Amino acid sequence: MTTLIMLAKECVPGKVKTRLSPPLSLTAAAEVAAACIDITADAVDRFGWTRKVLCLDGTRLPRDFTGWDIVAQSDGDLDERIAAVLDACAGPTVLIGMDSPQLDRGVLNLLSTEWPDDCDAWFGPAADGGFWALGLREPVGDLVRGVPMSRADTGAIQLERLRAAGLRTTLLPVLRDIDTVADLDAAAQLLPGTLLAEFADRAGAAVRAGVSTGDVVTDFADCASLADRAEAS
């Protein structure tokens, strides 16, 4: 069995998903972040884990996390925060982010069960050059500590770090983080009927109604009003 860690930020306007604004407001962008966490946590809850850990930057929870251990992220840069929570775990451990809620349920099923004998690590690359998942049979923070984060070569450096340590590493599918409106649209195509899809649809309607990139969509009420304008034109 495997410990699952989700790394997340509290969904405070101006702190999360700021690249979605404009055309979304900072408040709406925070709602998108909360939806990402909710969808990801719901997917995780469908499978059996030794332990589920929410490693949170902040204190406000966007949903009920009954059955999860909630721990605060440590101080320091992102590599240090990831390293610290890995060092606090024992046995097979997988860390995922909150930014890729379109992750395949089959992948979660694979990660939550017994790992193949020939796999020491799982690595999920992100389309922007980072990574969305890191699994270690023996969680050791030094495998991440010192890797430069939020760069186009972050994933390549991290993968090389695993391989240089002699870990037999299995690649997971490439996923696209939700950072921009284009990312939101792409994820919405894979998640019909979700809050993310609704935001993408209504924001798209707002753009078709003539909202410039200098304007913002503040909330769902504004989105609905603009959508009505688009349909009437």
Image: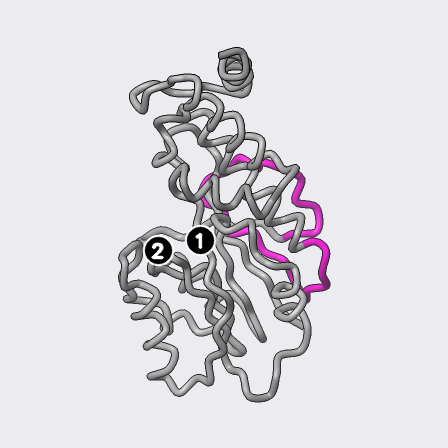
Q: Earlier in the sequence, mark 1 or mark 2?
A: 2
- Check disc 1 and give the amino acid type: Arg
Query: Where's the N terminus, which quadrant?
Result: bottom right
Determine if the magenta segment contains residue 65.
Answer: yes
- Residue shown at 33%/84% (left/top)? 164
Mark 1 and mark 2 in contact? Answer it, CB < 8 Å: yes
- Residue shown at 54%/37% (left/top)? 34
- Against 163, residue 104 (above or below) is above
Alpha-carbon neighbours of circle 1 within 10 Å: few (<14), some, or many (≥20)?
many
- Check disc 2 and give the amino acid type: Asp
92 or 104: nearer the viewer:
104
List x then y, in percent, for residue 168: 46, 85
SS type, badge 1: loop
- Which stretch did the figure color magenta? 45-68
Q: Work out how far the residue at label 1 is from the one at label 2, CA to CA, in angstroms.
A: 7 Å
Magenta: main secondary structure equals loop
SS type, badge 2: loop
Tag shown at residue 176: 1
List x then y, in percent, for residue 43: 66, 52
Query: On the image, numbered disc 2 is attached to which residue?
Result: 128
- Residue shown at 57%/36% (left/top)? 197
Q: Quadrant of residue 148?
A: bottom left
List x then y, in percent, for residue 136: 50, 74
Q: Left of 103 or right of it: where is 175?
A: left
- Against 189, residue 215 (above or below) is above
